[in-house]
Image (cartoon, rainbow, N blue to C red):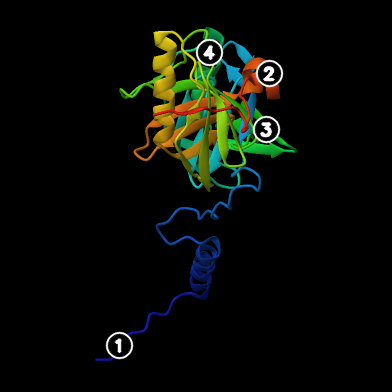
Amino acid sequence: MRARIANHHPVIVAALLLVLTGMLVSGCGPTGGPATSADGPPAAGLEGAPWQAVAIAAADGELKVPAGADVTMLLKDGRVTGRGGVNGYFGDYKATSDSLVFTGIGSTEMAGPPELMAIESAFFAALGQTKGYKLEGESLALLDDAGEVLVTMVPAKVVTLEGTDWIATGINNGKGGVQSPAADTTVTALFKGGTMAGNASVNQYSAPYELDGEKLTIGMATSTMMAGSDEAMAQEKAFISALSKVATWRINGDVLDLVASDGATQVTFVPAEKLLGTMGQGSGAGSPDTPTSSPTP
């Protein structure tokens, strides 16, 4: 028996060829949807340098971030870190040429002034709604899914570990917590030329340090031998003990954290100019040639 060869009408064959050609050009299979091109990499300048928020959209209007408020963001290698105004935060992000999405945002849970807490709440809410971004000049806008601006940011001032007068805002108490310094005490630090020096609460101190990238080792501190209140002396002892446990350092925005090898924060600092509006002698941070007389255990 001979096989029969269908004698299709030329018009039908031509129509089928046109349909198949259209599928190939559009990148679709017979059952597939329209093909989409892959998104490009994030825009240059988005990642790797800190941003400072200057305005945040809120339900009752735009919130202006006051000067000195630490509302920052650093995008690097898929991780976002920064400060919300009071608390540090962290999480993941995914960015393309025109999209930006944050996931897994978490933060510390410290309380602060009502104004800053309101700003922080609005900022964290904005991060959760962010779907895109726009870079224009030196300004970064975080956008929602409708393209509306949620947060306006500008490049943050870069603060360095060495050469900055620091004032402590938190000290590890040795019991698993970080406490604010006692009233009427000031704990300061200046890293310069391999020597860390400042005020430990009552006494002036100095200690050698070694810096290797993000690794930081602080040696035995020496100090003056003045007496103070029981509370101040206990705080000073906790501070010196915390320094001996430091293994790494990090700066988020303008907040410096000294961290132990197990990840526990030992001391948190901010630049003296942020609190006092001045640098140098006004900070009381001391200098590497601060007189010392006795090793501090």
Q: Is residue 279 visible?
A: no
Q: Secondary structure at mark 1?
A: loop
- The percent position of residue 114, horizontal first and vertical second, equals 52, 8
> Which numbered tag is attached to residue 118?
4
- As drawn, 256 above or below 75: above
Residue placed most toward the observer, 209 or 123 = 209
Tell me what residue is drawn at x 61 percent, y 21 percent. Answer: 56
Tell me what residue is drawn at x 67 percent, y 32 percent. Answer: 157
**Amino acid type of the residue that numbered disc 3 sits on in the rendered structure:** Lys
| C-alpha separation, residue under disc 2 versus residue under disc 1 | 101 Å
Contact flag, marks 4 and 2 (Cβ < 8 Å): no
Task: Please name the residue that numbered disc 1 is placed on.
Answer: 3
Q: Secondary structure at mark 2?
A: helix
Q: Residues within 10 Å of mark 2 (few under 14, many from 20)?
A: few
Camera-near label (4 vs 2) is 2
Task: Pick whichever of labels 1 and 4 is earlier in the sequence.
Answer: 1
- As drawn, 210 above or below 151: below
Contact flag, marks 4 and 3 (Cβ < 8 Å): no
Task: Please name the residue that numbered disc 3 is placed on.
Answer: 157
**Amino acid type of the residue that numbered disc 1 sits on in the rendered structure:** Ala
| C-alpha separation, residue under disc 4 versus residue under disc 3 | 23 Å
**Amino acid type of the residue that numbered disc 2 sits on in the rendered structure:** Gly
Contact flag, marks 3 and 1 (Cβ < 8 Å): no
Task: Pick whichever of labels 3 and 2 is earlier in the sequence.
Answer: 3
Residue placed most toward the observer, 78 or 59 = 78
**Amino acid type of the residue that numbered disc 4 sits on in the rendered structure:** Ala
Task: Please name the residue that numbered disc 2 is placed on.
Answer: 282
Tell me what residue is drawn at x 52 percent, y 20 percent. Answer: 187
Q: Residues within 10 Å of mark 4 (few under 14, many from 20)?
A: some
Given the current orientation, which residue lies at the most extreme right position? 137
